[in-house]
Image (tube, grey):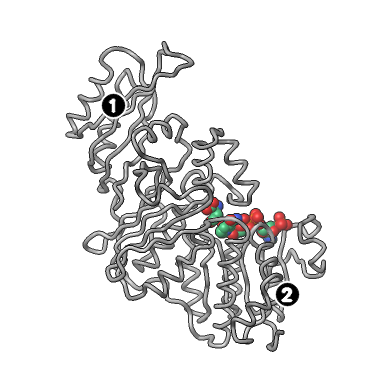
């Protein structure tokens, strides 16, 4: 039984995640009140949508008067104590969050694009109005990674994060390799399951993972990160042949986020398709699951694993934040430290980051091609560990073929210089495709 006055929630967005929050509160509301010692009863007071007439799975449960299309009335409603932003995007969402903070209503959001791109502005408002923003759902869906970094690891210097932090792209790579689906068919499945962003380009081109990596790096290193300076490439260029070749060499291909501390307050952040040895634990992260390996100077290695997207797992994180936000109502005047607590940080230019590489060239099949490419690589002092030219069984006499080079570790900038030169060779027909070969510990 609820023994306390309910805390009113203004739910901006009633799509995949918003309706998951509704369902979770309906199912577990009493449990939450019990777990909080009878202190907290959460009750949705108002719901913002674009189209109140849309037929939804929850249509019969939600009183029509609860819906609004006017975000200002939701934020201003005296029955709303906490605002949950789950509409996505960076313009209306920014206005809603900023207005809620100015009204001293704590905010819960799952919007990583908003915080990665406009977090500096929003956390300044949060600080000015001494009102917190909670964002557990913004990184890795149901995995409690934000709270772990903010609270559990607060006593650690974070040496690195590496992980799979986009469920949609991991799901797509898995469906392409295990079920032989085309890229398009696998993406359509991810969308139907509610994993993808409203604009799935962000999942596929690596930017959704980049937004999450920026949030993790900001928490760990405390300086504003220039979004444009982060090196991002997505899975659009991964072909079934790459997956098969990786497999034959003992690797899987994953969209990997790497965040690593360097000397002199420099931080490396990059997101790219990467070859990972099958023996590495991250190779076993399948489907919509995410995993984040965190290395702290005191705690050592920790691994967080769970569902990185989808209705219920993401709602789990939002509801956890709601309870925390409800607790903060009793002690307004605090905000969560976020930015900036370190002014001297800087990003490592991607050209200075080193790994081994898999490079796929589209070449004209004639004698001497391997030697021509190898000559340029040698001129740039880049070592070759293997070459391979898979035969297309459907067209064994093709004029244009894929030529794969496996390259030893070198700075990415050096590789880019060599590839710029190689692209000018007559035998090379398009821009080479580069994946990292990542030596994870
Ligand atoms: P979604 O299914 O597209 O739902 C968006 C909801 O917001 C819809 O109810 C829509 O109204 C409403 N909406 C959108 N723009 C609006 C506007 N300008 N004014 C009023 N209402 C508006 O999105 P979602 O998948 O739930 O994602 C929501 C947020 O959570 C995003 O920031 C996303 O990045 C984040 N997130 C999603 C997941 C996931 O697995 N899906 C996981 C973690 C974080 P209508 O219903 O009327 O169209
Ligand atoms: N579209 C995102 C993903 C949702 O697939 O990981 C979770 O942030």
Residue 404, image x and y in percent?
Answer: 33, 27
Q: Quadrant of the N terminus?
A: bottom right
Is residue 266 shown above or below 254?
below
On screen, residue 201 versus residue 120, left or right, reads right
Residue topped by disc 1: 387
Label 1 crowding class (10 Å Cα cut-off): few <14, some 14-19, many 20+? some
Residue 338, image x and y in percent?
Answer: 42, 72
Q: Which residue is drawn at the image coordinates 76% and 66% (left, top)?
A: 68
Residue 126, image x and y in percent?
Answer: 50, 75
- Depth check, front residue: 1 or 294: 1
* Alpha carbons under labels 1 and 2: distance apart: 62 Å
Q: Which residue is drawn at the image coordinates 40% and 74% (left, top)?
A: 152
Query: Is there any visible trace of residue 89 in the rendered image?
Result: no
- Depth check, front residue: 157 or 393: 393
Residue 83: name its quadrant: bottom right
Query: Is there any visible trace of residue 185 in the rendered image?
Result: yes
Is residue 119 shown above or below 43?
above
Q: Secondary structure at mark 1?
A: strand
Label 2 crowding class (10 Å Cα cut-off): few <14, some 14-19, many 20+? many
Total tally of numbered discs in the picture:
2
- Depth check, front residue: 42 or 431: 42
Q: Is mark 1 within 8 Å of ligand 2?
A: no
Label for residue 100? none
Label for residue 45? 2
On screen, residue 375 versus residue 139, left or right, reads left
Q: Secondary structure at mark 2?
A: strand
Residue 224, image x and y in percent?
Answer: 38, 64
């Amino acid at each position: 039984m609820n023994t306390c006055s309910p805390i009113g929630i203004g739910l901006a967005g009633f799509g995949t995640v918003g309706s998951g929050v509704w369902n979770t509160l309906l199912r577990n509301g009493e449990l939450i009140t019990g777990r909080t010692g009878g202190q907290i009863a959460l009750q949705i007071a108002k719901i913002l949508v674009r189209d109140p007439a849309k037929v939804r799975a929850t249509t019969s449960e939600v009183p029509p008067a609860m819906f609004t299309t006017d975000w200002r009335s939701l934020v201003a409603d005296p029955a709303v104590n906490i605002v949950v932003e789950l509409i996505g995007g960076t313009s209306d969402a920014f206005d809603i969050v900023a207005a809620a903070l100015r009204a001293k209503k704590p905010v819960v959001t799952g919007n990583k694009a908003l915080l990665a791109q406009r977090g500096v502005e929003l956390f300044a408002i949060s600080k000015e109005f001494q009102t917190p923003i909670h964002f557990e759902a913004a990184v890795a869906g149901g995995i409690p990674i934000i709270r772990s970094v903010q609270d559990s690891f607060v006593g650690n210097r974070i040496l690195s994060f590496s992980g799979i932090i986009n469920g949609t792209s991991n799901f797509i790579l898995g469906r392409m390799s295990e079920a032989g689906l085309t890229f398009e068919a696998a993406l359509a499945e991810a969308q139907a399951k509610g994993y993808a962003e409203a604009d799935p380009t962000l999942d596929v081109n690596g930017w959704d993972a980049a937004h999450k990596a920026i949030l993790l790096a900001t928490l760990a290193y405390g300086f504003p990160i220039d979004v444009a300076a982060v090196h991002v490439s997505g899975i659009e260029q991964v072909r079934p042949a790459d997956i098969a070749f990786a497999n034959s060499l003992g690797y899987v291909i994953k969209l990997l986020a790497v965040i690593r501390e360097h000397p002199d307050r420099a931080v490396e952040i990059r997101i790219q398709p990467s070859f990972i040895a099958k023996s590495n634990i991250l190779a076993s992260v399948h489907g919509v699951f995410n995993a984040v390996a965190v290395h702290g100077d005191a705690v050592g290695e920790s691994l967080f694993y769970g569902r990185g997207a989808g209705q219920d797992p993401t709602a789990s994180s939002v509801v956890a934040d709601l309870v925390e936000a409800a607790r903060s109502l009793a002690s307004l005047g605090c905000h969560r430290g976020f930015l900036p607590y370190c002014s001297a940080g800087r990003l490592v230019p991607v050209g200075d980051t080193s790994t081994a590489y898999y490079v796929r060239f589209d070449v004209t099949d004639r004698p001497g091609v391997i030697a021509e490419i190898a000559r340029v690589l040698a001129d740039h002092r880049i070592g070759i560990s293997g070459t391979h030219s898979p035969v297309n069984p459907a067209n064994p006499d093709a004029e244009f073929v894929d030529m794969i080079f496996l390259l030893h570790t070198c700075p990415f900038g050096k590789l880019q210089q060599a590839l710029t030169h190689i692209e000018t060779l007559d035998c090379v027909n398009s821009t080479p495709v580069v994946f990292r070969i990542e030596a994870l510990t």
